[in-house]
Amino acid sequence: RTEQGIAIVDRDEDGVDRAFRADVLAGLRQQQKAVPARWFYDEAGSQLFEQITGLEEYYPTRAETEILQARGAEFADLIGPDRAVVEFGSGSSVKTPLLLETIEPAAYVPLDISGDFLRESAAALGEKFPGLPVHPVEADFMRRVALPDDVAPLKKLGFFPGSTIGNMVPRTAVDLLRSMRATLGADDGEAPLLLIGMDLVKDAATLEAAYDDAQGVTAAFNLNLVHRINRELDGTIPVDAFAHVARWNDDFARIEMHLEAKRDIAFDVSGRRFFMRKGETIHTENSHKFTRRSANILLLAGGWTPLERWLDKGERFALILARA
Ligand code: AVJ
């Protein structure tokens, strides 16, 4: 359900999130066990991610913020004023004001699957930009979202920072890019623009450190998924039997996070029994990294033509402007 104001978490009579349970049970039955990365972000997981963004080793947030701060005038030039800025997965974004400050938008439309985050970010933005109409929409942006009537006639700029696109395998990323085109009304009126953050390929040591920090915050973020499964899905997974692993997959240009069993274990989740051998893993996240060419190809496959690209001084991260 993507209508405004409708809770989109579907819970059973015991209050269990049905999609979470279905994803975890299906994922644990696979040969390579896997749980989709979107399930990291419960209350604790979201807080841990905020902590990650401040870590010395985790450069993407700082690099992207640097670009937004340094290149505002260039965005404003290319994007122009009076657009409705539609942010996909607004979360608790601290980057949004940096964009809104520079481009003189006509409206701000944060889309998020979590109503709590949505209300928070809408309220914060409203205070910072008193004259700006803010229209939060609680929705799953992986599908086409109907925008509020007030913003439908406006020119649109989609904003998708953070390299969240990197969490998706190319097939899913292309689906999302096409959904964004549809949401932004690519086939009616003036062509929408998209400003999207993509993290870049770099040496494996830097990447692996970014996903396996010395303080162990990323390890805690990964292991929090096990706590969440135990709490919400009646799980008996021994958390201490797992080690956090982050490794660069060079064939697919991505960092993979896994939870590796340190010994043979058996456990239950939602009344089903599972076994893992020592060394076997649950694959919990992909974070794809891009080159100039792979970023362009992905955008083109999703129906977007790249127009301009900005990098941070260290050339670690890219913000790309594209048009439908
Ligand atoms: C929120 C998807 C951009 O992949 O870098 C951070 C999530 N995972 N550390 C990323 C994450 C481990 C992050 N994104």
Image: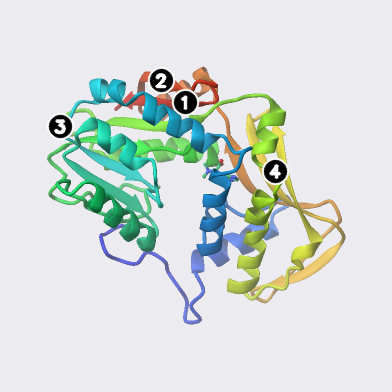
Disc 3 or 4, which lies upstream in sequence? 3
Q: Amino acid at mark 3?
A: Gly
Q: Which residue is mark 4?
A: 212
Question: Residue 316: percent from the left, percent from the top?
Answer: 55, 25
Can the viewer see residue 272 in this picture? Answer: yes
Q: Estimate how packed mark 1 is, as few (under 14), some (14 to 19) or many (20 or more) residues with alpha carbons within 10 Å.
A: many
Q: Is residue 63 above or below residue 172?
A: above
Q: Can residue 250 be seen from the camera position used here?
A: no
For this rendering, which residue is in front, 110 or 121? Answer: 121
Mark nearer the N terminus (2 vs 1): 2
The amino acid marked with disc number 1 is Ala
Which is more N-terminal, label 4 or label 2?
A: 4
Query: What residue would you read off at disc 2?
Result: 309
| Quadrant of the snapshot with the C terminus | top left
Q: What colouring does the structure picture have?
A: rainbow
Give neighbour class at mark 2: few <14, some 14-19, many 20+ (Cα, 10 Å): some
- Where residue 248 appears, as percent x and y from the top left, is 70, 34
Provide the secondary structure element on which disc 3 rests: loop
Q: Earlier in the sequence, mark 1 or mark 4?
A: 4
| Residue designated by label 1 | 318
Q: CA distance from mark 3 to mark 4?
A: 46 Å
